Image (tube, rainbow, N blue to C red):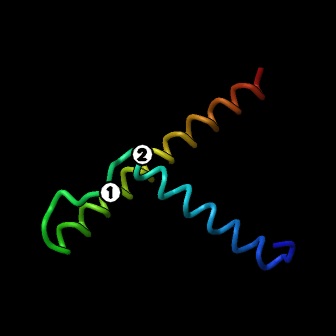
Amino acid sequence: METEAFKREAKNRNAIEGTISELVRGYGPRKARYRGLAKTRLANYFIAAACNVRRWAQQIAWQAEVAEAEAA
């Protein structure tokens, strides 16, 4: 657990688990709403896109807040 390789893998795993947790809590993809792989896959793409748009909006708001604080 002290090796550098383990720490790199743990960092990647933590990031992935955090994203999965965010998706499950915020968008509820634990159970599929549709039957069939194609519809389920499309629904997952839409969920991921919604998550990305939300993250993007939060980043834009944060950058505006930082710029405002620096200007003051």
* Residue kind at label 2, given as amino acid type: Arg
Dot 1 corresponds to which residue? 30
| 1 and 2 marks in contact (CB < 8 Å) | no
Q: In this view, does 72 lie above or below 64?
A: above
Q: Which residue lies furthest to the front in this view?
A: 1
Dot 2 corresponds to which residue? 25
Residue at the spot 30% in from the left edge and 62% down from the top edge? 44
Few, some or many C-alpha atoms within 10 Å of disc 2 (few <14, some 14-19, many ≥20)? few
Which residue is at the front of the view, 62 or 22? 22
Asked if residue 17 lies left or right of residue 63, the reply is: left
Q: In this view, does 69 lie above or below 54?
A: above
Residue at the spot 49% in from the left edge and 41% down from the top edge? 57
Residue 35 pos. (x, y %): 13, 67
Residue 24 pos. (x, y %): 40, 51
Residue at the spot 78% in from the left edge and 70% down from the top edge? 7
Q: Which element is circle 2 on?
A: helix
Residue at the spot 44% in from the left edge and 44% down from the top edge? 54
Q: Residue furthest left?
A: 35
Q: Distance between the residues labelled 1 and 2?
A: 9 Å
Few, some or many C-alpha atoms within 10 Å of disc 1 (few <14, some 14-19, many ≥20)? few
Q: Which element is circle 1 on?
A: loop
Q: In the picture, residue 14 is in which quadrant?
A: bottom right
Asked if residue 54 lies left or right of residue 42, the reply is: right
Question: How many numbered marks does the figure carry?
Answer: 2
Which residue is at the front of the view, 36 or 45? 36
Residue 64 pos. (x, y %): 62, 33
* Residue kind at label 1, given as amino acid type: Arg
